[in-house]
Image (cartoon, rainbow, N blue to C red):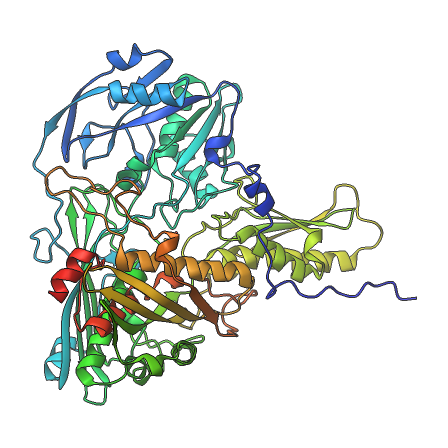
Amino acid sequence: MDSTPAAPAPSLGSPTTRLEGREKVTGRARYAAEYALPDRAYAWPVPATVPRGRVTAVDTAGALALPGVLAVLTPSDAPRLGACDDPTLRVLQDPEVPHRGWYVALAVAETPEAARAAAAAVRVRYADEPHDGVLHTDHPAAYTPEQANGGYPAHREKGDAAAAFAAAPVRVDCAYAVPPLHNHPMEPHAATAHWDADSGTLTVYDSSQGSGLVRSTLADLFDLPADRVTVVSEHVGGAFGCKGTPRPHVVLAVMAARHTGRPVTLALPRRHLAAVVGHRAPTLHRVRLGARTDGTLTALAHEVTTHTSRVREFVEQAAVPARVMYAAPDLLTTHRVVPLDVPTPSWMRAPGECPGMYALESAMDELACALGIDPVELRVRNEPDAEPDSGHPFSSRHLVECLREGAARFDWAAHRTPRRDGPLLIGTGVASATYPVYVAPSAARAHALPDGTYLVQTNATDLGTGARTVLAKIAADALGVALDRVTVEIGHSALPQGAVAGGSTGTASWGWAVHDACTSLLALLARRSGPIPEAGVSVPADTTASAKQKSPYARHAFGAHFAEVQADTVTGEVRVRRLLGVFAAGRILNPLTARSQFVGGMVMGLGMALTEHSTVDPVFGGFVENDLASYHVPAHADVPDIEVHWLDEHDKHLNPVGGKGIGEIGIVGTAAAIGNAFHHATGRRIRELPLTPDRVLAALG
Ligand code: MOS
């Protein structure tokens, strides 16, 4: 009799709710600030209150006299730190104040309230210096760096874009501005640090996108062997890039723990985030498009000016997507950066692509208007055979299919006449989306246990995305077992090294290692006989060699956004009535959480279009908007029913799981689609985000 059970239905491609969902909704899932270690103390940092200068004196007497205060660390007495690539992490090492909000002291106390009171009682004296936080395109300090963020060359030119532009029969030459934006995840950055002096080991619970990187950074800063440092990021309440590298809070928490000998929790108040955890740098764009009268592009120039801090060069790579999108024979893409007395920018969801595609896709809409060609059609006519900048063939590219399918589902053709409903002007817009396919080396281990279940380990991080769940699905399918026989362990630096959860790489990178480990485990099990021993049977995998291989293909995900908006001619309020996205992002592994990723990106893009902005205060320095009352993220009432679809895309040139990454592409292009719809509705073009009522009324005036 054949006792082989029928193979279970594949898990990948079918919807699965988050495996840790019950833990989260019952409050059992622990976040970094919730590790209530015995005897723990609390730290509260002191931000600088000047826009630029140096600390000349710190008076801690008043703070130390308060009840429950254990210590106050200052730049003159804080423990010295080791080397670090990221100067924003070398906190309390010198008296320089590069921007308002830079930390100048740290209070440690028995309770969070006492620590906060102590921080408020620290008296800091400064020598002020003149400061400049205002970005403009002809700033004398602007320069072209060697590289933009992501290691891309800052400047690329193919042919002579300026000459081709001058010779083009139809031309668009426009400037666009995207303001600074902030990630503002629901869970502000937090860390709990425990220094065990007897064993010389450090354990840190940190809200981060990658505990492996936090571990190696802390080991360097505190001069510890990496194997004495453990970092746990088991549950993370959102990140969007601002937890992609270690942040000052975790360094301060460790400093405080080592200094006091107590476990210390440091949970940043939201009001501190704007200055110390990074932001999307503002970008000023000039886009020139030259075309023949049939819509064929002959010239494309995208020039970006952005800011960075005086602490660290970070260049938002906003001209990079123009290297990918359209078949223009003469193509210029370049970046200039201005170091200012501002907080240091960093990653925010789709760095580069998000602001860059706002500008490029707005300009494409302007060109469509100038030509009198449908904006979907204009994009289709400029579909390239190969990646325009590099000439590499695409591994797969289904932008045209996304545009066509989106147009059909949105009933685009029937909505191309703007209409009026009382005070409301209503119109529609479209924009393309793109995001690169990255993959990073990762390791994993798969165990077969005697009870017939499997354990899979990799140091992945689940930021709320469903990473844990999709890895279990990948493992279940590779092993050919039902999902409930697989347990996944992630979020701990002692596990096999996993890549940072960034760049939409997670599923591909960890999934590849999990797939390899499970496949090897199956092969091993097939070769052996007898029961599984008590300790289980286990197999490691490491994708370093395979993931680092250069692909001969240009690999990108694509998508198309369609928006219908209304502009209120009385109040100036713009509302999105419909939003529809179609994506071609390889194989979709968990439709339930994938939809959430796309929708989440589009909601964030809606916020970028209509409400979100940060402002560098020209007089007092730092960012003006530093809470959710002033930095307006979309609330439920702002978000219409969002429709998301994807194409069934098979791309053999990716990785064993076949996904392209979906965490970021949803935000790319959304704001342009909304801005284009605003223009369609009103006949007015606003080239600076967001479309707030003051700007709208001025434009309609
Ligand atoms: Mo994401 S902005 O690549 O961490």
Can the viewer see residue 360? no
Direction from residue 123 to residue 130 in the image, left or right: left
| Relative side of 334 to 73, left or right | left
Q: Residue at x 20, y 58 (%)?
A: 571
Q: Quadrant of the C terminus?
A: bottom left
Please indicate whether residue 622 sits to the left or right of residue 254 in the image.
left
Figure disc tally? 0
Q: Which residue is rendered at x = 33% and y = 48% of the image?
A: 183
Residue closest to the far right = 1
Vertical placement of residue 530 versus 45, above or below: below
Residue 291 vertical position relative to residue 441 in the rendered view, above or below: below
Return the x and y of residue 143 as percentages of the image width and height: 14, 55
Which residue is at the front of the view, 282 or 514? 282
Image quadrant where one finds the N terminus: bottom right
Residue ID at (11%, 55%): 136
In the image shown, does 111 or 125 lie closer to the viewer? Answer: 111
Q: Position of residue 632 (x, y in %)?
A: 29, 49
| Location of residue 366 by image quarter | bottom left
What residue do we see at 38% from left, 40% from top? 246
